[in-house]
Amino acid sequence: MLLDNHFEDLTFSEDRLINTSHTVAKTYTNLVHWHPFAEILLSLVEGNEVELNFRKYEMAPNDFIISYPGDLHTIRNVSLDSFLLVQFPLELVTVVPEFNSIRQLMERSPYCRYDVSDIQIGKMVMTIKKIVNSTKDSGSFREAYSYSLLLKFFSYYGKWCLENRIDENDVVNDAYYKSSKLMAEACLYISQNCAEALTIDDVAKKIGISKSYFSHLFKDYLQMTFVDYLTRERIRRAESMFLDRKKKIIDIAFECGFTSISSFNRSFRKTKGISPREFRSAMIDD
């Protein structure tokens, strides 16, 4: 289910805490989204592309990347069976003090490129595959076993992060990481509150930076202005409301944050190329 065209809500099968899959949900390919759980993506083929917090990663077989709760990410140009996925509440890991103490370091090192000569990386890749295979078992304590493998993976991963930590003097990398996280936070806040009378000052204050710095960062990362992005999010929300035949277009416009029906019609036509009424008719007919 999509909420605000970004949020992925996942109910794990059989009330399990760890979910695995050999396929990427078609709904979320080529779509920027986020979720409240952590996700390990292990590439099975050459040419997979994942964008995480506005940074692109070209992935080869056995490369893996981890998205943490709230991270904006997109899986692009992939066949549905080109990844192995492991999804879980991050609290399963951070409940262990050792992991919690290096959580920031782990979040700054989300991508690992496979190196056949690196034994530590080989252990991590093998453990990810074991986790996926273990969830197919039908015996008792299967999830306890999967959980033990997840902890084993993070013990390898934690050591790898410590051994390959980002140089604290690398100001460029550190600044890129911090600004990426700020923009991810800003996008989520805008998406969730786009129906309100939201201003650029509100969002800048929310993430704790100045209006001018926010405006510069936002345009640099998203290649559009704050107003353009806010309008796009409002129109996306309107699109999802069009299927309710009982709702009038003027009511949808105001519920999505537009101050007049004329501004809604103008913005919608500029974005979609047709009027809201024409779009709705085509949508319902289809």
Image: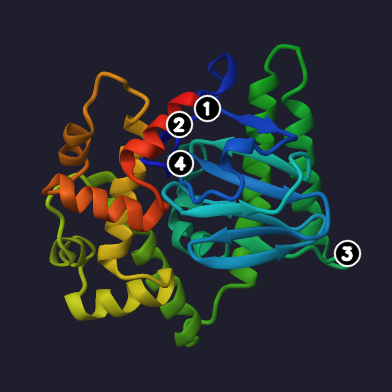
Give the residue number, with chain letter if any, for mark 1.
286
Could you give the CA–CA distance between mark 4 and mark 2, rounded to whole angstroms?
Answer: 27 Å
Residue type at numbered disc 4: His
Q: Is residue 216 left or right of residue 42?
A: left
Label 3: which residue? 116
- Kind of residue at badge 2: Met
- Which structural element holds mark 3? loop
Question: What kind of element bears circle 4?
Answer: loop
Judging from the image, the colouring scheme is: rainbow
Q: Which residue is mark 4?
A: 35
Q: Nearer the viewer, mark 4 or mark 3?
A: 4
Q: CA distance from mark 4 to mark 3?
A: 32 Å
* Relative vertical location of residue 53 with respect to residue 212 in this rendering, above or below: above
Residue on which the image places disc 2: 283
Measuring 52% from the left and 27% from the top, which residue is drawn there?
286
Q: Nearer the viewer, residue 92 or 19?
A: 19
- Check whether the beta carbons of the residues at disc 1 and disc 4 lie within 8 A of each other: no
- First of labels 2, 3 by sequence position: 3
Q: Residue at x 71, y 65 (%)?
A: 58
User: How packed is label 4: few (under 14 Cα within 10 Å), some, or many (20 or more)?
Assistant: some
Q: Is residue 35 left or right of residue 119?
A: left
Q: Looking at the image, which residue is at 81% across and 46% down?
A: 126
